[in-house]
């Protein structure tokens, strides 16, 4: 089977092709960065929900848990 002869591009054509590839990849990167932000936001929301559910299931009020955390932080800061 005969092969097609490979086209030789001029330097200007090569430059334009590379610029086009760069633009396409930049667009893809922007899309991926947006998707990354959305996923990170969902993770944060799931963590908040899990924390809130843990507080509710413990039978403690949110304020009580916050006080416990603050006390824990205060003790750790004093030890440092």
Image: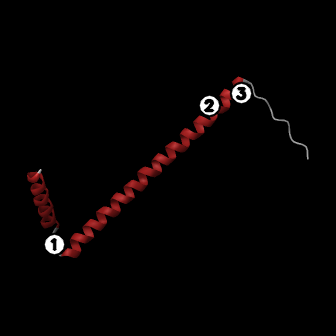
Question: How packed is label 3: few (under 14 Cα within 10 Å), some, or many (20 or more)?
Answer: few
Q: Secondary structure at mark 1?
A: loop
Q: Which residue is mark 2?
A: 19
Q: Which residue is mark 3?
A: 13
Q: Is residue 75 left or right of residue 2?
A: left
Q: Closer to the N terminus: mark 1 or mark 3?
A: 3
Compare residues 48 and 72 and report the one nearer the observer.
Answer: 72
Question: How packed is label 1: few (under 14 Cα within 10 Å), some, or many (20 or more)?
Answer: few
Q: Is residue 40 left or right of residue 60?
A: right
User: x and y percent of residue 17 in the render?
Assistant: 67, 32
User: x and y percent of residue 61 in the render?
Assistant: 15, 70
Location of residue 75 (image quadrant): bottom left
Per the model, the C-alpha gap separating discs 1 and 2 is 60 Å
Does the CB distance between marks 1 and 2 fall below 8 Å? Answer: no
**Residue drawn 39% across the image and 59% down it:** 42
Q: Secondary structure at mark 3?
A: helix
**Residue drawn 66% across the image and 27% down it:** 15
Find residue 5 and name its label. none
Q: Which residue is mark 1?
A: 60
**Residue drawn 87% across the image and 42% down it:** 3
Task: Relative to 15, say whether 56 is above or below.
Answer: below
């Amino acid at each position: 089977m005969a092969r097609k002869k490979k086209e030789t591009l001029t330097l200007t054509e090569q430059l334009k092709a590379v610029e086009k590839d760069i633009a396409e990849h930049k667009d893809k990167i922007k899309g991926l960065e947006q998707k990354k932000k959305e996923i990170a936001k969902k993770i944060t929301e799931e963590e908040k929900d899990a924390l809130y559910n843990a507080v509710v299931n413990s039978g403690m009020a949110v304020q009580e848990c916050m006080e416990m955390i603050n006390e824990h932080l205060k003790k750790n800061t004093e030890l440092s």
